[in-house]
Amino acid sequence: MSKQGKDFSKYFDFTGARVLKEEEGKTTYRINGRDITVNAAPNYKEEKRRGKEAIQVHYETATPPELMELGKGKLYHITTYGCQMNEHDTEVMKGMFEQMGYAPTEDRNEADVILLNTCAIRENAEDKVFGELGHLKHLKIEKPGLILGVCGCMSQEESVVSRIMQKHSFVDLIFGTHNIHRLPYLLQDALFSKEMVVEVWSKEGDIIENLPKKREGMRGWVNIMYGCDKFCTYCIVPYTRGKERSRRPEDVIAEVRELARQGFKEITLLGQNVNAYGKDFEDLNYRFGDLMADMAKIDIPRIRFTTSHPRDFDDHLIEVLATRGNLVEHIHLPVQSGSTEVLKRMSRKYTREMFLELVAKIKRAIPDAILTTDIIVGFPGETDEQFEETLSLVQEVGFSSAYTFIYSPRVGTPAADMEDNIPEAVKKARLARLNRIIEDLSRESNEAEVGRTVEILVEGVSKNNANVLSGRTRTNKLVHIEGPVEWIGQFIEAKVTEAKSWYLKAEPVLEYRMEEAVS
Ligand code: 5AD
Ligand code: SF4
């Protein structure tokens, strides 16, 4: 690393910034009276580059012995926004906090460190975070010793880091998705320097194994890969999460085996595009289908995965999924649009016909597979006819449910430069129409379950009724069932008695737990 500081001013709006200190590649600025040390700053151009460098895997632990006491007697709180990838990153950070001696708290007023683990996927996700920062400012004023950090996908955006540095200077720490393993060091810097510390690597680093993870409940998330190389024109993820890199199969298998040993009942394999798993291995011809075949051999009742890209969903994977066992009959397959023309402008790299063909193949191999999806309405230039094509595709496939979104322009992505010519009212009307159809399909799909006996993994008490338990079928349908809280974490066989739009009601068919029945 050079002894010189780096000039970060080209990345940001540095109005009023003054350089205070430069050393070891870091530069300390004074901006609006606040001292800010920048170790590394996000840069869209670098985030977009896909280098040929081989990814290294490191097996060391993140927390050095001298920082194991840093949090003794102190409390931390993390608020998480966004997808399961973020939820899982939070589990890793919780693990690191607890290795440093911190204890968790739900009450932000008593926390010594608060982190916001942010999502950048749509503008409203970002608005929420800036709103939250407004609230936290008051807490920080009351309690100056509080360390307030922003991490996750928003930190990877130039404009966000710039805005926080200029307008939210009470923040103490900003770090990116590639800097999570550096948390103990960054926290130490923020605690002792009293400056705002900014460290956001634009290029993904290596794969760091052996980070601690604090998992709760009976369902575990396991990363199988990081990043995305698809560059759909609307999507910020390839920038915020870097290039595709897969964890070694032996590391994934060892982690899932360990979770099985600990008694976890369900594993969800995570990746921004799990179907691209293994494409980056130079020494190994081992892809997602192979990984799923190995998962099927592990003694854990349910294995899920998310999220798929239709383009990479190959025949071998379908063949493996059709063997069932612990591989469940639910596939989340984001289609985004039913119009080939829109798909082309989204750079999805498949047509309507190719998607329908893939669905037909899946249904031939797994006739009772439940398919769910993601859809964007109001993509720039989407005509009424093209939107109708989305509706007809949704009906033709018969998705059981869907996450639906109004297109939200993301700075730095190609679609943000396309003319957004659809009036807001039209976008809202399209979303409402789509949602009505999805609701009908969801109810129909649920009605088909009435009278059937299903296996439910009981997850907890229902949100709306403390006397009712909630659980999930293999196909990920939400089920409400009456029973004792001891059933939480257990598999129960139940008969579906009633279908609602978004959940099923069921009654247990056995008086005893399935596990006892088989043992
Ligand atoms: N605007 C709206 N929705 C988006 N998604 C991704 N990027 C955007 C955007 N810019 C949706 C896609 C994706 C899901 C996670 O979020 O449907 O599958
Ligand atoms: Fe997850 Fe994408 Fe949101 Fe990041 S931007 S939290 S990867 S959904």
Image (cartoon, helix red, strand yellow):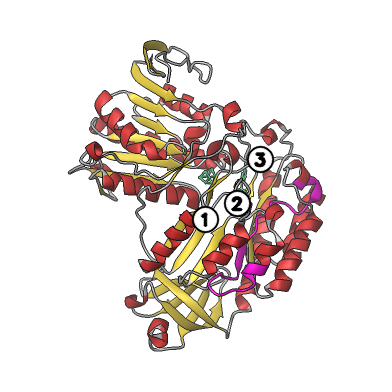
Q: In the figure, residue 315 lies in which quadrant?
A: bottom right
Question: Can you say which quadrant of the picture contains the N terminus?
Answer: top left
Task: Give the residue number, with chain letter if any, for mark 2.
Answer: 284
Could you classify mark 2 by the number of other residues whose Cα lies within 10 Å: few (under 14), some (14-19), or many (20 or more)?
few
Task: Give the residue number, with chain letter if any, for mark 3.
Answer: 231
Q: Amino acid at mark 1?
A: Pro
Q: Position of residue 188 (x, y in %)?
A: 28, 32
> Which residue is found at the position 52% from the left and 73% from the top?
473
> Which residue is found at the position 63% from the left and 49% from the top?
279
In magenta, the rendered stretch is 319-343
> Which residue is found at the position 67% from the left and 42% from the top?
232
Q: Amino acid at mark 3?
A: Phe
Task: Give the residue number, with chain letter if any, for mark 1.
Answer: 249
Taking 157 as reference, is 85 above or below it? below
Describe the element under mark 2 as helix, strand or loop.
Answer: loop
Q: Position of residue 203 (x, y in %)?
A: 53, 32
Q: Position of residue 489 (x, y in %)?
A: 38, 72
Q: Nearer the viewer, mark 2 or mark 3?
A: 2
Taking 222 as reference, is 472 above or below it? below
CA gap between label 3 and label 1 equals 25 Å
Kindly check if marks 2 and 1 are in contact, taking CB atoms under 8 A apart as contact: yes
Taking 495 as reference, is 207 above or below it? above
Q: Of the two numbered discs 2 and 1 on the same chain, state the one appearing first in sequence.
A: 1
Q: On the picture, is 299 further left or further right than 276?
A: left
Q: Of the two numbered discs 2 and 3 on the same chain, state the one appearing first in sequence.
A: 3
Q: Amino acid at mark 2?
A: Leu
Describe the element under mark 1 as helix, strand or loop.
Answer: helix
Q: On the picture, is 394 further left or further right than 480?
A: right
Disc number at residue 86?
A: none
Q: Position of residue 421 (x, y in %)?
A: 74, 36
Taking 494 as reference, is 22 above or below it? above
Q: Nearer the viewer, mark 2 or mark 1?
A: 2
